[in-house]
């Protein structure tokens, strides 16, 4: 792929061509935007953070966040569809937790760094 010359030359080298090639891969950026869109809601961030620390059912999540069970279910759906959380069924109950993926771990770390808090299990 040929790139047009940049309007201002600032000593760009081969790395500029590599960066511009990556910028053309819009699908990768769309994937990132989708993940952040799912976390663009305070309640979803709270639910995700909670599920990074424990496995819970909808009723317990509802009680911990002081919101209705239908509201919790509404927020769980996009988190699950994005692969950030997973659920496991035990009888009639479904228990949710953060997925054990690189993306989930990175988002968890980012949330805690932005909020300047430490995981409950790390406090001593």
Image: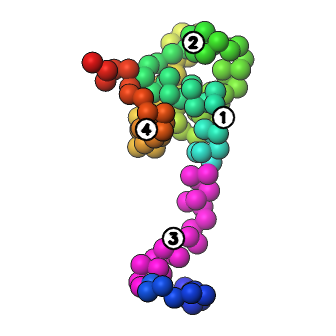
Task: Work out which quarter of the rendered image holds the N terminus and state it.
Answer: bottom right
Q: Is residue 68 above or below residue 75?
A: above
Q: Which mark is residue 113?
A: 4
Q: Earlier in the sequence, mark 3 or mark 4?
A: 3
Name the dominant secondary structure of the magenta segment: helix
**Which residue, given by chain and number where applicable, does mark 1 sit on?**
41
Label 2, label 3: how far apart the Cα atoms are? 42 Å
Q: Is residue 58 above or below residue 99?
A: above
Q: Residues within 10 Å of mark 2 (few under 14, many from 20)?
A: few
Residue 55, percent across and down? 46, 18
* Res. 108 image quadrant: top left
Q: Earlier in the sequence, mark 3 or mark 1?
A: 3
Left or right of residue 12: residue 36 = right
Q: Residues within 10 Å of mark 4 (few under 14, many from 20)?
A: few
Mark 4 in CB contact with mark 1 (< 8 angstroms): no
Specify the segment rendered in magenta: 13-33
Q: Residues within 10 Å of mark 1 (few under 14, many from 20)?
A: few
Label 4, label 1: how far apart the Cα atoms are? 18 Å
Residue pictured at 65% horizontal, 44% vertical = 37
Residue 104 appears in the picture as rendered: no
Label 3, label 4: how far apart the Cα atoms are? 27 Å
Label 2, label 4: how far apart the Cα atoms are? 22 Å
Label 3, label 1: how far apart the Cα atoms are? 29 Å
**Which residue, given by chain and number where applicable, does mark 2 sit on?**
64
Left or right of residue 79: residue 53 = left
Residue pictured at 38% horizontal, 20% vertical = 120
Q: Nearer the viewer, mark 4 or mark 1?
A: 4
**Which residue, given by chain and number where applicable, does mark 3 sit on?**
22
């Amino acid at each position: 792929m040929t790139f047009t010359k940049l309007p201002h030359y600032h000593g760009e080298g081969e790395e500029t061509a590599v960066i511009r090639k990556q910028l053309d891969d819009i699908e990768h950026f769309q994937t990132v935007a989708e993940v952040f869109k799912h976390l663009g809601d305070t309640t979803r961030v709270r639910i995700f953070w909670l599920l990074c620390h424990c496995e819970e059912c909808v009723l317990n999540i509802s009680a911990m966040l002081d919101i209705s069970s239908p509201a919790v279910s509404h927020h769980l759906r996009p988190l699950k569809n994005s692969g950030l959380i997973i659920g496991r069924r035990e009888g009639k109950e479904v228990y949710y937790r953060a997925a054990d993926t690189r993306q989930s771990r990175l988002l968890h770390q980012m949330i805690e760094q932005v909020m300047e808090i430490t995981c409950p299990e790390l406090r001593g």
